[in-house]
Amino acid sequence: MEEPVHYLVMLILHLDGTLVREVLEFSRAMTLMECLAFGSEHREAVATYDRDVNAWFMNDGSGTWQGYQCIQDPSKISVFE
């Protein structure tokens, strides 16, 4: 779990039914565990959980948070790492 990751991809379901992938590029590589922790913290910063419907609603009203992925970019990995 020490692999470097370079992007956080958020999955947002818009109110019109469109599933959108929003990409955040990190300014530095972080470990997979750091990225997973960041994703959880970011979700809590941009969305609010509604216990009645068991869903995270985006604070900007754009839809619901469906999940996130931590992505590694092979072109950014040095062979000497």
Image (cartoon, grey):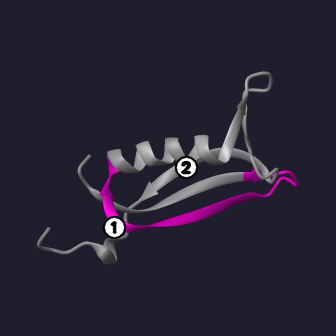
Q: Indicate which disc residue 68 carries.
A: 2
Q: Residue furthest front?
A: 45
Where on the picture, by quarter, is residue 45? top right
59, above or below 56, in the image: below
Marks 2, 1: nearer the viewer: 1
Q: Nearer the viewer, residue 57 or 70?
A: 57
Numbered disc total: 2
What residue sits right under mark 1 in the picture?
28
Where on the picture, by quarter, is residue 74? bottom left
- The kind of residue on which mark 1 rests is Arg
Q: Residues within 10 Å of mark 2 (few under 14, many from 20)?
A: many
Q: Residue furthest right?
A: 16
- The kind of residue on which mark 2 rests is Tyr
Residue 60 spot, x, y in % from top left: 78, 53
Q: Residue furthest bottom?
A: 75
Residue 59 spot, x, y in % from top left: 75, 47
Query: Dividing the image into 4 quarters, which one contains the C terminus?
Result: bottom left
Side (left or right) of 2 relative to 5: left
Q: Is residue 17 magenta?
A: yes
Circle 1 SS class: strand
Side (left or right) of 19 relative to 44: right
Side (left or right) of 49 relative to 68: right
Residue 77 spot, x, y in % from top left: 25, 72
Q: Main secondary structure of the magenta part?
A: strand
Q: Kindly identify the residue that appears in the image at 64 percent across and 61 percent down.
A: 21
In the rendered structure, which segment of residues is drawn in magenta?
A: 13-32
